[in-house]
Image: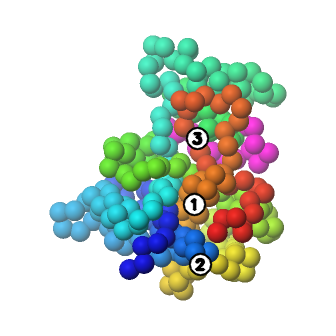
């Protein structure tokens, strides 16, 4: 087996004990300038025998990490850090992240509801309120994200490092923009009626514009048919960009202690990706 490649994993994590998680394995071969989706894992993550979905997920990720001589990282769609108000509630008001969020809130006009330091983090409020796209970001401990945060933090010490937190929907918007594709792809790709055709159109155009990217036919069909598989792929691709320093950097003055959500730059040069 040729081990001269750089591997990035993308994880679309399901909440609770669900087995609907998906992992995309993206291998970069720098000598041939090829980027290959070598595996798309989903059915293997379903519980079997005494093994739980959690057991299989962690063991699969660790095995995939060990197979690569160079491991770029694991990109995860889910909160890798907790809101600052939970670190030390008695001193939350003096926490640098809380102060930063308060200052940002004060600068906004019109003002949204005051930020809740026990639900939100600096990365979310920045992406939602200060980017040109005004990304729709779920609060780290909002109703949908809380089970993901709990599951991630329970397994954090066992996950292969480094870890990149990503937001597939935001990444997809930026990827569509950087490739010069129709903006409505980013609106349609999760639509029940139009999503299949949007994802199919995206991959048709992506493979034309980035011919060094290779996806097996069976995996391509899965990426088109299943949104969670699609998100795992977009996460892996974002992780690959993050490892190369090609994602958006935190703004000036951003708290050093705060986690960050990686999104691709809108001016990404796809030839430098390879």
Report the quarter where the C terminus lies.
Answer: bottom right
Residue 66: quarter of image: bottom left
155 lies above or below 94: below
Judged by depth in the image, the label closer to the viewer, 3 or 1, is 1
Q: From which residue to which does the magenta span run? A: 129-143
The colouring scheme, among rainbow, by chain, secondary structure or one colour, is rainbow
| Residue position for label 3 | 260
Judged by depth in the image, the label closer to the viewer, 2 or 1, is 2
Across and down, in percent, residue 124 comes to: 62, 39
Asked if marks 3 and 1 touch (Cβ < 8 Å), the reply is no
Q: Which mark is residue 240?
A: 1
Of mark 3 and mark 1, the one earlier in the sequence is 1
CA separation in Å, label 2 and label 1: 17 Å
Residue 240: quarter of image: bottom right
Left or right of 213, for residue 58: left
Asked if marks 3 and 2 touch (Cβ < 8 Å), the reply is no
Residue 187 can be seen, yes or no: no
Across and down, in percent, residue 213 comes to: 62, 77
Label 1: element kind:
helix
CA separation in Å, label 3 and label 1: 16 Å
The residue located at (39%, 53%) in the rendering is 160
Q: Which mark is residue 32?
A: 2
Q: Residues within 10 Å of mark 2 (few under 14, many from 20)?
A: few
Left or right of 261, for residue 52: left
Q: Is residue 25 magenta?
A: no
Of mark 2 and mark 1, the one earlier in the sequence is 2
């Amino acid at each position: 087996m040729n081990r001269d490649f750089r591997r990035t994993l993308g994880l679309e994590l399901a909440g609770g004990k669900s087995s609907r998680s998906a992992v995309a394995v993206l291998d970069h071969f720098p000598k041939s300038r090829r980027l290959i989706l070598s595996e798309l894992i989903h059915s293997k993550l379903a519980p079997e025998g005494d093994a739980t979905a959690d057991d299989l997920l962690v063991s699969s990720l660790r095995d995939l990490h060990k197979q690569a001589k160079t491991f770029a990282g694991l990109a995860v769609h889910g909160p890798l850090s907790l809101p600052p108000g939970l670190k030390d509630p008695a001193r939350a008001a003096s926490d640098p992240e809380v102060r930063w969020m308060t200052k940002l809130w004060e600068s906004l006009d019109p003002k949204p509801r005051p930020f809740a330091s026990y639900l939100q983090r600096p990365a979310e409020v920045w992406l939602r309120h200060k980017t040109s796209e005004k990304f729709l970001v779920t609060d780290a401990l909002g109703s949908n994200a809380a089970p993901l945060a709990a599951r991630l933090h329970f397994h954090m010490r066992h996950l292969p490092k480094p870890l990149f937190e990503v937001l597939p929907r935001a990444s997809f918007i930026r990827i569509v923009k950087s490739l010069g594709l129709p903006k409505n792809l980013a609106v349609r790709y999760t639509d029940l009626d139009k999503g299949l055709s949007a994802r199919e159109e995206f991959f048709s155009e992506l493979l034309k514009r980035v011919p060094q990217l290779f996806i097996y036919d069976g995996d391509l069909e899965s990426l088109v048919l299943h949104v969670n598989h699609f998100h795992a792929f977009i996460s892996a691709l974002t992780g690959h960009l993050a490892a190369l320093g090609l994602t958006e950097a935190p703004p000036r003055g951003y708290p050093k202690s705060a986690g960050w959500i990686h999104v691709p730059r809108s001016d990404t040069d796809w030839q430098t990706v390879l």
